[in-house]
Image (cartoon, rainbow, N blue to C red):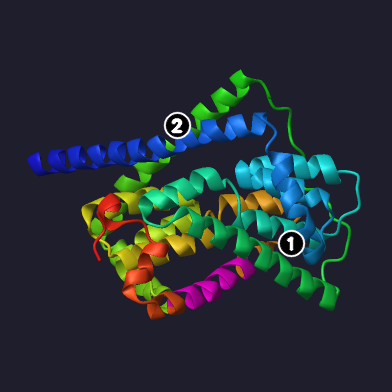
Amino acid sequence: MHTLKHEATQLTREVFTITFTLFKIMIPAIIIVKILVELGIVPYVAWALEPLMSFVGLPKEASIIWAATMLTSNYTGMVLFFQFFENEPITVAQTTVLASMMLMAHNMPTECAIARKAGIKVIYAVVLRVGSGFLIGWILHLLYSKTGMLQDSNQLIWTPSETDDSLYGWLIQQLESLFYIFVMIAGLVFGLKILKLIGVEALLKMLLSPFLKMTGIHKDATSFTLIGMTLGLAFGGGLLINEAKKGVLKKKDIFLSLSLLCLCHSLIEDTILMFLIGADLTSILLFRVVFSFVLMIFISQCFKRLPEHSHHHFVVSVNNQGVTK
């Protein structure tokens, strides 16, 4: 009984530690992004992205959608998508290209700050996500234009409901999101402990290790990588931050795990969101996973060939994070 109470106390403390660490990163980032949006930064980002749209077969309005998504969230991008393309002709192929780019690069101020705290440089995370977003969009555009696939007019499955755009409405929305994150972290921490006790975690490591091995990710990072891939970078990153502080994972494993999470995370929620605006499910789920793993194999091989003294260009200082070499 005493042991059970001790374990519960330890896990509760861990939940609050992870949540507090995440909130210290997220809350300032959320406030800064809100200020930047109110100051009108989105059109300037869109202007910078506009020349790229022709390379991926998208109208120039798509640059505003991607810019707003990068700075805020997929939900904002969905609302803008509805505003621009509710009555304008756009194909399923174009919708899928834009959705894939949004899935790769969204909510970057917050998520890149979390990735930095967990162990990688912000500039690396930004370049990786924006670059991979453009690359996957370009590849899909070539595929669809050469094969004639998905050229039907897009049909919206979802239409946005009325939202409160006031400062009070925004504040309530953020508080609800933070509470949701706290509840999810509590569930993940306790759930991982149960899975470890009953042997499921070991089974998952065994089943997934061949796939993760191709990307160079150690089996000890399997659970956190899987959580981030399915539920989101904030959750996987939050758990990785906790492990980094303990010194459990090596610097290389954290770098590779976070790189994969930057490319492929929230496969459940975000995929559903993009499906609702009419994107092709096979492309935004299966193709995205395959694309991410292929790119990760390339990143892993490049990182392996780099001299160790150059790793600091990509990885946050060991002293700041508590990770081992």
Residue at the front extreme, as displayed: 309
Residue 177's place in the image compared with 287, above or below, is above
Place of residue 76 in the rendered image (x, y in percent of width and height, measured from the top left): 68, 40
* Above or below, 211 relative to 317: below
- Secondary structure mostly seen in the magenta stretch: helix
Residue at the (24%, 42%) spot, across then down: 11
Residue 260, position in %: x, y?
A: 47, 64
Task: Reply yes or no: does residue 298 show up in magenta.
Answer: yes
- The kind of residue tagged 2 is Phe
Q: Residues within 10 Å of mark 2 (few under 14, many from 20)?
A: few
Q: Which residue is mark 2?
A: 179
For the C terminus, the quadrant is bottom left
Q: Which numbered tag is attached to residue 15?
A: none
Residue 314 visible in the snapshot: no
User: Does the magenta portion include 70?
Assistant: no
Horizontal and vertical percent position of residue 189: 31, 47
Q: Residue at x 70, y 40 (%)?
A: 42
Q: Secondary structure at mark 1?
A: helix
Say what amino acid the circle numbered 1 marks: Val
Q: Which residues, given as a range, are shown in magenta?
A: 287-300
Q: What SS does tag 2 mark?
A: helix
Q: Is residue 241 left or right of residue 27?
A: left
Does 133 sit above or below residue 118? below
Please state, as top left, top right, bottom left or bottom right, where the N terminus lies in the image.
top left
Given residues 171 and 118, the one toward you in this image is 118
Neighbours of disc 1 within 10 Å: few (<14), some (14-19), many (20+): many
**227 horizontally vs 106: left or right:** left
Residue linked to disc 1: 97
Q: Residue at x 79, y 66 (%)?
A: 55
Quarter residue 171 falls in: top right
Residue 204 in the image: x percent, y percent? 36, 67
